[in-house]
Amino acid sequence: MTRAAPPHEFRPDGAVTNPRVLELALEKKLRQAGLRPTRQRMALGALLFSAGDRHVTAEDLHMEAVATGERVSLATVYNTLHQFLQVGLLREVAVAGTRAYFDTNTSNHNHYFIESAGELVDIPSSSIRVDGLPEPPPGMRIEHVDVVVRLVKA
Amino acid sequence: MTRAAPPHEFRPDGAVTNPRVLELALEKKLRQAGLRPTRQRMALGALLFSAGDRHVTAEDLHMEAVATGERVSLATVYNTLHQFLQVGLLREVAVAGTRAYFDTNTSNHNHYFIESAGELVDIPSSSIRVDGLPEPPPGMRIEHVDVVVRLVKA
DNA sequence: ATTTGTGCAAATCGTTTGCATCTGA
DNA sequence: TCAGATGCAAACGATTTGCACAAAT
């Protein structure tokens, strides 16, 4: 019988892999945002936040959760996504079309949108600059600048 | 009895005001796009293309048409907008949210989106420059770059 | 005469909501 | 205990579609 990997496997890059540690971190994250760490929110949070930057629709996430054996209703997925939005754990990306896309990367960055696949991808560069923005009209302020680069097959 | 303005009123700026001339121009525009100049398409086209750059939703346009006394169904407004899109007479603007916005200005330009009013406005400047766009992934080409500046009350 | 467009109402899609029930603090 | 969260199903708004009828070539 070979030995299973120890639960506290050491990784030179310092990434935490112990599920219990991740769980505690997520619980803390939710509590700090003022959200109770319920089973459903923990499950969705784990899917969203433990695999780098992600772009999901509500239905994507619901299917994933169900596939993982979680019991969550689609309505709760919607509610949860909006709660995460409100507390700044997610950001919504402006893509014309029917479905709403949620992005786990809340910092300022931009996107490719691959129309044929309905897929959203971070632009692998922080070098995009938008210059020459005029002053906003009086009484208004700029809340966010969305840049979406639409890609089609060449 | 005072004299009504002549149908061919002369305007120093050269703008054409004769309704028959406008009608013929629109008919030509539709035919060139491969669309039959039906009553409904002419009516919607007149609303869309004879008043400078416009941003409308399907429902906006339908209400306008009905208010003008035109008999057009909402379904036909949707169909017509999409036909106009396909032949390049309109462009759709990427605004996350429920409704689709159509823009009669099909050249490259950018938008303010006033969230509180759900209103879309051209950015009054062609000085916006987007720099540092990386090469698109292989096999893909950039179809359009959408820049939407979201405004909220200051 | 033939093709194309239109209107209506029903269907669909993504999303939200009302409300009874359950759960975490 | 009890505010807060969840699930279900029904409601919803925007858009699309199927099909009989009407209009354009």
Image (cartoon, coloured by chain):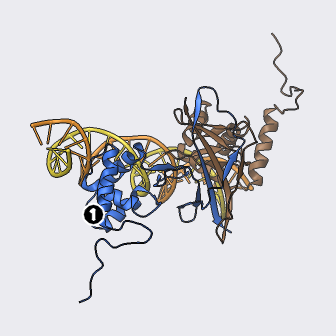
Chain colours: A blue, B brown, C yellow, D orange
Assign a secondary structure to mark 1: helix
| Residue under numbered circle 1 | A20
Which residue is found at the position 31% from the left and 64% from the top?
A66
* Residue type for callout 1: Arg
Q: Is residue B132 left or right of residue A14?
A: right
- At label 1, counting other C-alpha atoms closer than 10 Å, the crowd grade (few under 14, some 14-19, many 20 or more) is few
Residue A17 quadrant: bottom left
Picture coordinates of residue C1, whole percent (x, y): 66, 63
Which residue is found at the position 63% from the left and 58% from the top?
A150
Which quarter of the rendered picture does the C terminus of chain A lie within? bottom right
Picture coordinates of residue A116, whole percent (x, y): 57, 65
Residue A73 in view here: no
Note whether A37 is above or below A142 in the view shown: below
Q: Is residue A38 left or right of residue B27?
A: left
Give the camera-side residue of B150 and A75.
Answer: B150
Outermost residue, bottom direction? A1
Picture coordinates of residue A59, whole percent (x, y): 39, 59
Which residue is found at the position 38% from the left and 48% from the top?
A84
Residue A136 in view here: yes
Picture coordinates of residue B151, whole percent (x, y): 57, 36
Q: Is residue A39 left or right of residue D18?
A: left
Outermost residue, top direction? B1
Q: How many marks?
A: 1
Give the camera-side residue of B101 and B141.
Answer: B141
Which residue is found at the position 28% from the left and 55% from the top?
A40
